[in-house]
Image (cartoon, helix red, strand yellow):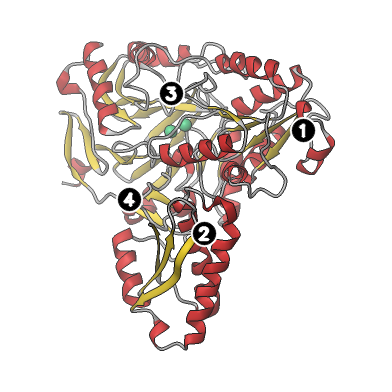
Amino acid sequence: MQDEQKDLLLIVPLGGVEEVGLNMTVFQYADDLIIVDAGLMFPEEDMLGVDYVIPDFSYVLENKEKVKGIFVTHGHEDHTGALPFLLKEVKAPLFATPLTIALIKEKLKEHRISDIPLIKVKPRESIKIGCFEIEFLRVTHSIVDGVGLGIKTPFGSIVHTGDFKLDPTPVDGELMDLHKFAEYGEKGTLLLLSDSTNAEKGGFTFSEKEVRRSFEDIFAKAAGRIIIATFASNIHRIQQVIDVAVQYGRKVIMCGRGIVSNAQIALDLGYLKIPQNTWVKLEDLKKVGDNEVVLIVTGSQGEPMSVMSRIAMHEHPHIKIKDGDIVILSARIIPGNERSIGRIINHLMRRGADVKYEKVSDIHVSGHASKEELKLMMNMVRPRYFMPIHGEYRFLKYHANLARKSGIPEENIFILENGEILEISDSGISKNGKIQSGRIFIDGKGFGGVEDIVLRDRRRLAHDGVVIVLVGIEKLTKKIISGPDIISRGFIFEDASQEIINEVRGLMAKTLFSIGDNIISDTSVIQTKLRSALKKYLRDTMDRRPMIIPIIMEV
Ligand SMILES: [Zn+2]
Ligand SMILES: [Zn+2]
């Protein structure tokens, strides 16, 4: 019996096969368990009060003494964001390339985790761990220092691509290691796990260098300031902005915590190159002419508290939009964020900025392989079995269709759900059952621990009740015509004095007033502000955390 169990290799995606984000996969043979990536997902609009979402990894916690190593393919949040929560409990060595390690180190520092060995590995290096041998394979992607993995197991080799595209002219000149991938094909590969994010898209994904041409066009014509929002992790994009800025004699100012710290890390490690006197401080913005500066900021997805949002809402202390400003949202519009991004574009345009975004300008290319590249990957690796990963079901399905067209038999293609087990033994490969899986909702830095959102809501309602803030706004003039009124159920207001209720009403009125003219059109911003002001007040003064629901009625 014991022996029988020993001769099984289990592959379990704990996240990333039902969504974009939460990427995490477990490989287990007997008492050796390794984890590839542990990512997060940003909450969807209806997930009130949730800061982010991570995969349910209770299976790993139940088997934590078996975890031999954690392998991280690259530094994107959807591959690293759950690490602090995992590494609080699981003390195993983590292996990744230098930039990825540096980004993870920063993250662990924030969570005060210092007892995890972080081991830097170079592409083409191999790590022997338990019965596995893991080789790092250089890929090109929208972050530098990305890798795929070649995993040697007792049943044969498995290739995990990580996130990739085939960029023939990468910004840093580090080409994808096609030779190595082809070598796996030569030697025979049991199973390929491949990135499906762009499996819907035909053709090839453009090289990151293509973005440069669009930037050059914009810079050449710009008479005023240029403000560019992009992902803090997209070092290639930041590099290209810097290069074009230098070309057109502009200084660069970076603004937003993520961008400044990532750029500093990349600069220290030599992944980012900035000529002397090019990167200047935000305080110096006044000293440089409008046509002598480009600002790189966070908030390309319209995140409510980001720099770009604050600029759009006229709330940034240093950066105020004026006529002649060009704003570039140089990132993909992530599905689900259309509304918040649209809102920001409206605000920016209303204040006089010329806004360039994905739909109207070629200021972004994807970091993920399109159909032709995915086929090429399959043809290089030539796996016996295929499992699409990274994406919603339809992306996986498209990718599976491609695999079939590339000659992999239908019965050798496996689309798994989160928690489903792919079992490999001498007699073949098959799906076999499911372990506990799902999504965990995090509120703050692990504050309140990790729990299911429904449970959390129930618990919160049971312990602290609910507080509703009601404001009536006149549709045309946007004037407050009623409220703010405070209604509570199950919360201690009933026992509290009228004084506290008055105080809360005063606080809400003050918060509304501080939003000022931005009250135009933006109920979700008003809601966020009211909620966070009241949350902080109730926590500080009474140590209570009721559910807070601000309701804005337009009449
Ligand atoms: Zn990525
Ligand atoms: Zn990813």
Question: Residue 249 lies in what quarter of the image?
Answer: top right
Circles 3 and 2, Cβ within 8 Å, touching? The answer is no
Measure the alpha-carbon separation of dots 3 and 2: 36 Å
Q: Is mark 2 within 8 Å of ligand 2?
A: no
Circles 3 and 4, Cβ within 8 Å, touching? The answer is no
Q: Is mark 3 on a helix, strand or loop?
A: loop
- Closest to the camera, between mark 2 and mark 4, is 2
Q: Mark 1 points at which residue?
A: 279
Circles 1 and 4, Cβ within 8 Å, touching? The answer is no
Q: Is mark 3 within 8 Å of ligand 1?
A: yes
- Closest to the camera, between mark 1 and mark 4, is 1
Q: Is mark 2 on a helix, strand or loop?
A: helix
The reply to whether residue 187 is in sight is no
In the image, residue 537 sits, relative to residue 101, either above or below, namely below
In the image, residue 467 sits, relative to residue 406, either above or below, namely below
Question: Residue 99 lies in what quarter of the image?
Answer: top right
Measure the alpha-carbon separation of dots 2 and 4: 26 Å
Mark 1 and mark 3 lie on one chain; the one further toward the N terminus is 1
Q: Mark 2 points at which residue?
A: 529
Dot 4 amino acid type: Arg
Q: Between 264 and 237, which is closer to the camera in this rendering?
A: 237
Near mark 3 (Cα within 10 A), the count class, few <14, some 14-19 or many ≥20, is many
Measure the alpha-carbon separation of dots 1 and 3: 30 Å
Task: Name the residue: 40% across, 83% down.
Answer: 492
Q: Mark 3 points at which residue?
A: 368
Q: Between 37 and 374, which is closer to the camera in this rendering?
A: 374
Residue 320: percent from the left, percent from the top? 68, 42
Dot 2 amino acid type: Lys
Mark 1 and mark 4 lie on one chain; the one further toward the N terminus is 1
Q: Mark 4 points at which residue?
A: 439
